[in-house]
Amino acid sequence: MTATAAATFTGGGRGRVRLGRLLGHAEGRFAVALLVAIVLLGLVAPRVLPYGPTQINARDALQAPSRAHWFGTDELGRDQLSRVAAAAPIALYSATSSVAVALAVGTTIGLTAGYAGGPSDLALSGVVEVMFSMPALLLALLVVGVLGPGLNNALMAVAIVYVPRFARIARGATLSVRQREFIEAARATGCSAARIVVEHVLPNILPSMIVQTALSLSTAEIAQASLSFLGLGVQPPYADWGNMLAASRAFVTVAPWLVIFPSVALVLLIIAFNMLGDALRDVLDPRLRSAVLPRLRGAGLPGGA
Amino acid sequence: MRYVAQRFAAGCGVLLVVSFLVFWLGTLIPGDLSTVLVGSEGATQQQYRELRHRLGLDQPIVVQYAHWLGAALRGNLGKSPITGLYATAEIARRAPITLELALLALAESIVLGVFLGVFTAVRAHSLADVTVRAILFVMFAIPPFVAGVLLVLAGALFLKPLYQVGYVPLAQSVGLNLRSMLLPSVSIAVPLAAMTAQMTRTSLLETLGQPYIVTAMAKGAPRRHVIYRHALKNALAPIITLQGYVFGSLVGGLIVTEQVFNLDGLASGLLAAIGRRDYSFVVTGTLVIAATYILANLLVDVLYPIVDPTQRV
């Protein structure tokens, strides 16, 4: 359940070479280390910490960080370290799975529109452009309004909002691949359209899609955490860095530790995702420019989180 | 001029489609007006059906939309059946807060971003450049609501005069108004400034490598003059294009920041309306924000050829 993008690299011989190159990249190494640390925090903490993340202990409410509670306790006496750790898998899950859904749907739309061309391209591109013209979080908010609050609905909302950016990139990449000779050769040998798309076009647009996946992880996580902060994502008593911040806002002056630790955790995860995106871009697609900055012409990012 | 007209027409078209999309999503929000008005208990099926008919909710969505659009174009955006407030009045009350917040955040991010971008570009690869860029990298990773909560904390600890200042309308007192808006706008501007700074640095560095800059330097023009008049002016185009992307993040920032600082703006109203399933306001509120967003992007498109003559058609 690390990044879906990273999972792609562990298969096959070529994959291993690329993982090696990612680890040879300073930023990539740092990103992978940070992500591994966050995953370990989520896996190990529940087994070694004496308190459950939702375990209420009113006698220990609002305690400052101490030997017993490294990150202090919240207004219900819940151990803050347990909660910050319990939120790590939720954050990783919501970011990766919303992007994975968007990747799958967006790539399918983009491949179909780009390869088929004609009226289906026009229709699909039209839908994509309209969705692009809405600010991301606003659209996500509306979708959650329809679906109702909750982790999985917030996840779907972000996935829906992210479909256009994947569709647009897949379409652009497909259009340029379609012109190449090997596609013509495949067609001449009598390959079906479905086979050409899956066996010849898809592998060639994959690097661009993987880079976009990694770049989207950080903004998707920001969107998820924002929805949780607004009370529309992960619901209490379950811990999420976003809803933890929302709950501890009222105690900001009496218990600053409640604000600081979830913030740091969230920012570290976003930094890790950003660096992973940058590193993957350098390794897979050196022609693309900075990741932190959207590629402005052509397949750019729509309204961010 | 024809270009502007074309872009404007395209923007209107997109807005029309978006309005239908939003209207349709609004009707999908569980529970329509009739259930809210009648309540879940005490009403017979007959009363329920009559009310639905009277409100026009039993008609096809396209017909409902046409009615709504017709009224909206005449400036009647409807009245909330729950709060009893007219949508236009609500928007007129809330929009100035959101708009001011947005403009302040945008101005701060551009000023700070361009300044830091120039600062790092002219010192490229020095210690100062590396340090500032590391800070920018972290700034970029701070979501507005995290920045907002941390700024509230910083305000409580170090900036007492800025801590928990209630909103004061601009018309009442400019000074107090700015004091109440400073932290909220900065919390939105943090990641945006980082983006603008990175883009300014990249673009300026590229421009500073051009032969005409070498010429300007060689003929002895003052360095400051070369950087600001020759280089920055030509590096502006991508920075302006970036602002189109920034608007999207800006709207996201507004939504969370209004919550953090308890500002009673458009986004707060929208969120509250979603909470009480008051979809007439959800639709209008969303549309006002979406329209402003499309308009702002249009402005960037129009501005672009003015700054970059090679883009003129």
Image (cartoon, coloured by chain):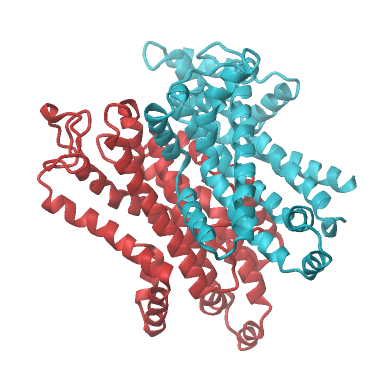
Foreground of the two, A97 or B119:
B119
Does residue A261 appear to the left or right of A48 in the view shown? right
The answer to whether B174 is drawn above or below residue A161 in the figure is: above
Foreground of the two, A215 or B83:
A215
Locate residue A31, reporting x and y percent. 38, 63
Residue at the image position 48 percent from the left and 55 percent from the top: B137
Residue at the image position 26 percent from the left and 39 percent from the top: A238
The answer to whether B9 is drawn above or below residue B163 in the figure is: below
User: Which of the 4 image quarters holds residue A170?
Assistant: bottom right
The quarter of the rendered structure image containing the N terminus of chain B is top right
The quarter of the rendered structure image containing the C terminus of chain B is bottom right
Locate residue A50, reporting x and y percent. 9, 45
Does residue A104 appear to the left or right of A60 in the view shown? right
Locate residue B102, reporting x and y percent. 61, 33
Residue at the image position 73 percent from the left and 20 percent from the top: B75
Q: Can you tell which chain is drawn cyan?
A: B
User: Which of the 4 image quarters holds residue A226?
Assistant: top left
The answer to whether A116 is drawn above or below residue A201 in the figure is: above
Locate residue A299, reporting x and y percent. 63, 61
Residue at the image position 43 percent from the left and 34 percent from the top: B151
- Give the colour in which the image draws chain A: red
Query: Is residue A134 in sight in this rendering?
Result: no
Query: Is residue A65 in sight in this rendering?
Result: yes
Foreground of the two, B121 or A132:
B121
